[in-house]
């Protein structure tokens, strides 16, 4: 299977990541709407929100404001993450690979992982949850590595775009 172009791996991954983005925003909207309308039960300090098509499957979490805000912020972050990822994959399934749009999408994705991700991590840990330990700091490092990789990929795409443009001018 080819990686780029129509009917390629990037074509199928585009749809998977777009579905993940839509699913994430729908899930957080459903959670917040259910909590707002009282469509939940409290069991030992945890809310349980039923998922309609799955019968006895529940969304569970501690019924505390900081937990609900944290869940909401993370779900919105992952919605944007998967949406930007799907935009990158959308440019990869196009006929022309090196485009200014692909470079821009890679920069947005890098910005999300290098700036927004660490800020969100600090806001959640310090301001909202008021944690003194950072046991899950590896998640922050993974985001920084992914953002750095996206920046390198954007630089490669920029160089490819320039070479492709030069090549188009000589023909």
Image (spheres, rainbow, N blue to C red):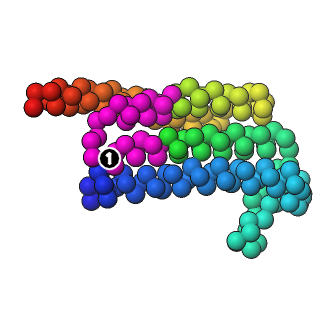
Residue under circle 1?
94
Front-most of residues 128 and 1:
1
Residue 108 inside the magenta-drawn segment: yes
Q: Judge whether residue 144 can be spotted in this image.
A: no
Horizontal and vertical percent for residue 160?
A: 24, 31
Q: Is residue 4 above or below residue 39?
A: above
Quarter location, residue 150 = top left
Q: Residue at x 24, y 25 (%)?
A: 162
Front-most of residues 26 and 72:
26
Quarter location, residue 68 = top right
Quarter occupied by the N terminus: bottom left
Horizontal and vertical percent for residue 144?
A: 50, 30
Q: Judge whether residue 107 can be spotted in this image.
A: yes
Q: Is residue 152 above or below residue 23?
A: above
Quarter occupied by the C terminus: top left
Front-most of residues 161 and 24:
161
Asked if residue 55 lies left or right of residue 25, the reply is right
Quarter location, residue 23 = bottom right
Q: Residue at x 48, y 34 (%)?
A: 109
The image shows a total of numbered marks equal to 1
Q: Residue at x 84, y 52 (%)?
A: 35
Q: Residues within 10 Å of mark 1 (few under 14, many from 20)?
A: some
User: Which type of secondary structure does the marked residue at label 1 adopt?
Assistant: loop
- Magenta residues span 85-111
Q: Main secondary structure of the magenta part?
A: helix
Q: Residue at x 86, y 44 (%)?
A: 64
Residue 69 inside the magenta-drawn segment: no
């Amino acid at each position: 299977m080819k990686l780029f172009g129509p009917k390629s791996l990037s074509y199928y991954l585009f749809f998977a990541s777009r579905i993940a983005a839509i699913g994430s925003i729908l899930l957080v909207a459903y959670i917040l709407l259910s909590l707002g309308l009282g469509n939940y039960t409290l069991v030992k300090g945890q809310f349980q929100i039923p998922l309609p098509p799955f019968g006895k499957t529940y969304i569970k979490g501690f019924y505390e404001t900081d937990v609900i805000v944290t869940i909401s912020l993370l779900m919105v972050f992952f919605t944007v993450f998967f949406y930007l990822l799907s935009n990158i994959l959308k440019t990869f399934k196009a006929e022309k690979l090196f485009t200014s749009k692909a470079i821009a999408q890679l920069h947005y994705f890098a910005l999300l992982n290098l700036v927004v991700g660490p800020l969100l991590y600090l806001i959640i840990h310090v301001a909202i949850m008021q944690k003194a330990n950072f046991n899950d700091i590896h998640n922050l490092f993974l985001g920084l590595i992914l953002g750095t990789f996206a920046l390198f990929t954007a630089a490669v795409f920029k160089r490819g775009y320039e070479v492709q443009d030069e090549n188009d001018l000589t023909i």
